[in-house]
Image: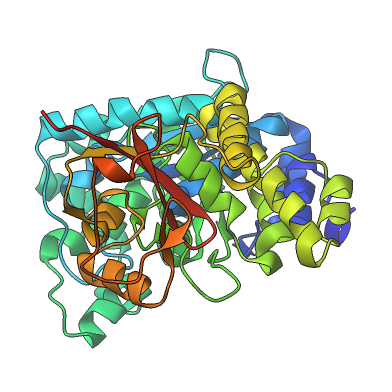
Amino acid sequence: MALGLKSDFLQLLTERGYIHQCTDIEVLDLKATQGVLPGYIGFDATADSLHVGNLVSIMLLRRLQQTGHQPIVLMGGGTTKIGDPSGKDEARQLLTNEKIDSNIASIKTIFGNFLTFGSGSCDAIMANNADWLDGLEYISFLQKVGRHFTVNRMLTFDSVKLRLEREQPLTFLEFNYMILQGYDFVELSKRYGCVLQMGGSDQWGNIVNGVELGRRMANAELFGLTTPLITTSSGAKMGKTAAGAVWLKAERLSPYDYWQYWRNVEDADVGRFLKLFTDLPLDEITKLEKLRDAEINEAKKILAFEATKLAHGEAAAKAAADTAHEAFEGGGKGKDLPIITSTSGTAVADIVVQLKFAASKGEAKRLIESGGVYVNDNPVKEITATISAADADTSGAVRIRVGKKKHGLVNFNEG
């Protein structure tokens, strides 16, 4: 039993490495043994998809539901119009109401893969803070809520302090974000009986604000829990690659490329990521994280399959695994490999960028110079090299490889 905790929920979070900080963990643990515990995490709708950087929060909600409690997904239909200054160097571009609503509808399909929505006591709810924030009368709101916040303390928050230290502008609009986030917790407590807010470690100050605001405004007993900052063993931020964000929607990133992201994690991260991002039992994970050298690749394939299965379904995960096997071990061309159409005489460097194997043409040229780019398994030796339909095999395609792990196909349109 983890740290003497009694509830299945907090035991599970502790054993799998989710907990960084928690307010009154003993009292929260007791509450989690006494009935259904509603808890929430907020997500702003700045794009039509979430990405791997959001995944630990999504998995927290999944763990809450798996242990018999109720997850609440709070979409920031209101706060998206302001922008969370946490981790940002500049003000966020403001979106129209129509774009925000469209993004929320798109994001809900992602949560449908991880959570069960419905009307049962443990079924997930998706709420939208625009329902209460859009109708606020600002002066009366400041009188009722703003008086519980001191500017002195707000200036100590990392989300504010870091921006000021970097001499980056922080608008008064953004400065209000933490007040509105605290108010969200109070509203969710009143509307849904929500007692727990969760989030990343950078949200600790905002979460504690909400806990305290609930006590002052409604004498409510609320709790906060944060996860550690999830980085790779080399210190890189989760969810970022040279080609861009690792999106959770197939329209943004194919299930095959998503599978490849997890297949290519660092050896030292396999066990930790299996605990955080899959449902595999802990005893099985313990066996897998003991694998070394070439054997660790089998554990990475399991991680890739299980993570892809959660995000895109079992069929997509199997198809991605089959495509990877064919491309890497069978010497063939799996049907889900990235494919582009080009014309004869296109520079290989341009092809590498179009396949998203490099973020820029300059990076692609550097890959060529280092001997890391192959056409039909032959190394490309000149940065000005081109390909044409004459390089295609009998299927009409040219195989492009960058390093050992990135494979793509080029078809030719000569019309």
Residue 414 coordinates in the image, percent (x, y): 14, 33
Residue 285 as seen in the image, left or right of residue 158? right
Q: Which quadrant of the figure has residue 130?
A: top left
Specify whether residue 220 is in view.
no
Q: Nearer the viewer, residue 175 or 387?
A: 387
Residue closest to the far top = 119
Residue 55 coordinates in the image, percent (x, y): 51, 47
Image position of 290 with respect to 41: above or below: below
Q: Which quadrant of the figure has residue 401?
A: bottom left
Colouring mode (rainbow / by chain / secondary structure / one colour): rainbow
Residue 399 coordinates in the image, percent (x, y): 41, 45
The residue drawn where x is 20% and y is 64% is 175
Residue 298 coordinates in the image, percent (x, y): 76, 50
The residue drawn where x is 12% and y is 53% is 93
Image quarter in which the C terminus is found: top left
Q: Nearer the viewer, residue 145 or 169?
A: 169
The residue drawn where x is 21% and y is 65% is 361
Image position of 237 with respect to 215: above or below: below
Total numbered labels: 0
Residue 304 as seen in the image, left or right of residue 400? right
The residue drawn where x is 48% and y is 29% is 335
Specify whether residue 153 is in view.
yes
Q: Nearer the viewer, residue 187 or 219?
A: 187
